[in-house]
């Protein structure tokens, strides 16, 4: 009998502070199998999905995610990703994915040079992925951000590739879905809030879906991102 749950591994770095948030949503709300993966360990164990959570890994020294990229466990994460494994990076996790070369581009200082902690609106740009299948195309979500280095940047050719290939998953927008400069909280190119790699297995985003997944907080738009992953993984399991 095939498993009815997905096995999530949440990597914990020194300075991670959203690891328990992700654990709570996946374990307590969505009833999945979840374990923490300590950064000094070299094994990711038998997991289906790896989550790189938000926080300030290694105190954000040098650049955000620059030191975490060299943690022992990242070698296994990179190997896992190279085999098509599902890897989700949230906020600092997104920064680590870019520093590791698993996603293109970089996260620069916010245009305001200030740390921003607030709710933002993001538009679903592509709902044909394992991360967004539970959303509607063009749907506007309300999800919080909390970062000082969320300004996504890449060269013109990379941005064109991301746009042409449908690799931009989320874009900062107005409540009515319009993409405007005023809706961009950090100066990200083309209001980009989240992207995937070419094969669609690795995703990074600056907003925090785990902080918008519990009805107690009155915001649940982020929950469907995790539900998308779970549903797609279980469907794939049934097909094999």
Image: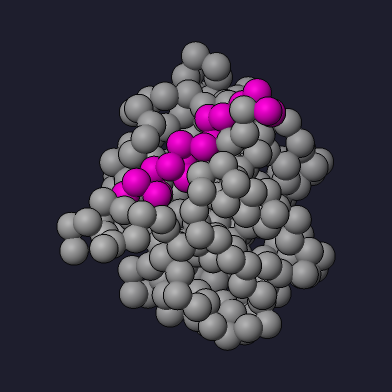
Asked if 93 appears above or below 186 in the picture, the reply is below
Instruction: Name the residue located 69 percent from the left edge and 28 percent from the top edge.
Output: 217
**Quadrant in the rendering for residue 25:** top right
Task: Name the residue at the left extreme.
Answer: 239
**Colouring scheme, one of rainbow, by chain, secondary structure, one colour:** one colour
Q: For residue 121: magenta? A: no
Q: Is residue 167 visible?
A: no
The secondary structure that most of the magenta stretch takes on is helix
* Residue 133, image x, y percentages: 33, 39
Left or right placement of residue 99 versus residue 110 in this view: left
**Quadrant in the rendering for residue 210:** top right
Instruction: Name the residue located 66 percent from the left edge and 75 percent from the top edge.
Output: 38
Instruction: Name the residue located 38 percent from the left edge and 67 percent from the top edge.
Output: 85
Task: Name the residue at the front extreme.
Answer: 1
Look at the image and give the residue range highlighted in magenta: 216-232
Q: From the viewer's side, name the closer residue of 97 and 164.
A: 97
Left or right placement of residue 178 versus residue 84 in this view: right
Quadrant location of the C terminus? bottom left
* Residue 100, image x, y percentages: 54, 71
* Residue 158, image x, y percentages: 41, 55
* Residue 219, image x, y percentages: 61, 26
Q: From the viewer's side, name the closer residue of 197 and 217.
A: 217
Q: From the viewer's side, name the closer residue of 66 and 6.
A: 6
Instruction: Name the residue located 41 percent from the left edge and 71 percent from the top edge.
Output: 81
Quadrant location of the N terminus? bottom left
């Amino acid at each position: 009998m095939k498993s009815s749950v997905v096995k999530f591994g949440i990597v914990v770095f020194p300075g991670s502070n959203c690891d328990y948030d992700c654990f709570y949503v996946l374990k307590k709300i969505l009833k999945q199998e979840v374990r923490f993966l300590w950064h000094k360990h070299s094994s990711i164990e038998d997991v289906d999905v790896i989550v790189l959570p938000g926080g300030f890994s290694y105190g954000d020294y040098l650049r955000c995610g620059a030191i975490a990229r060299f943690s022992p466990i990242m070698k296994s994460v990179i190997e896992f990703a190279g085999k098509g494994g599902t890897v989700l990076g949230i906020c600092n996790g997104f920064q680590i994915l870019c520093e590791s070369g698993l996603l293109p581009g970089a996260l620069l200082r916010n245009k305001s040079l200030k740390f921003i902690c607030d709710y933002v609106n993001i538009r679903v740009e592509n709902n044909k992925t394992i991360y967004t299948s539970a959303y509607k195309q063009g749907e506007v979500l309300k999800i919080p951000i909390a970062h000082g280095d969320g300004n996504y940047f890449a060269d013109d050719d990379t941005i064109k590739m991301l746009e042409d290939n449908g690799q931009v998953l989320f874009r900062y927008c107005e409540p009515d879905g319009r993409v405007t400069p005023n809706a961009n909280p950090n100066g990200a190119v083309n209001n980009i809030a989240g992207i995937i790699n070419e094969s669609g297995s690795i995703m990074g985003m600056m907003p925090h879906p785990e902080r918008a997944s519990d009805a107690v907080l009155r915001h649940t738009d982020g929950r469907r991102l995790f539900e998308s992953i779970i549903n797609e993984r279980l469907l794939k399991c049934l097909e094999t």
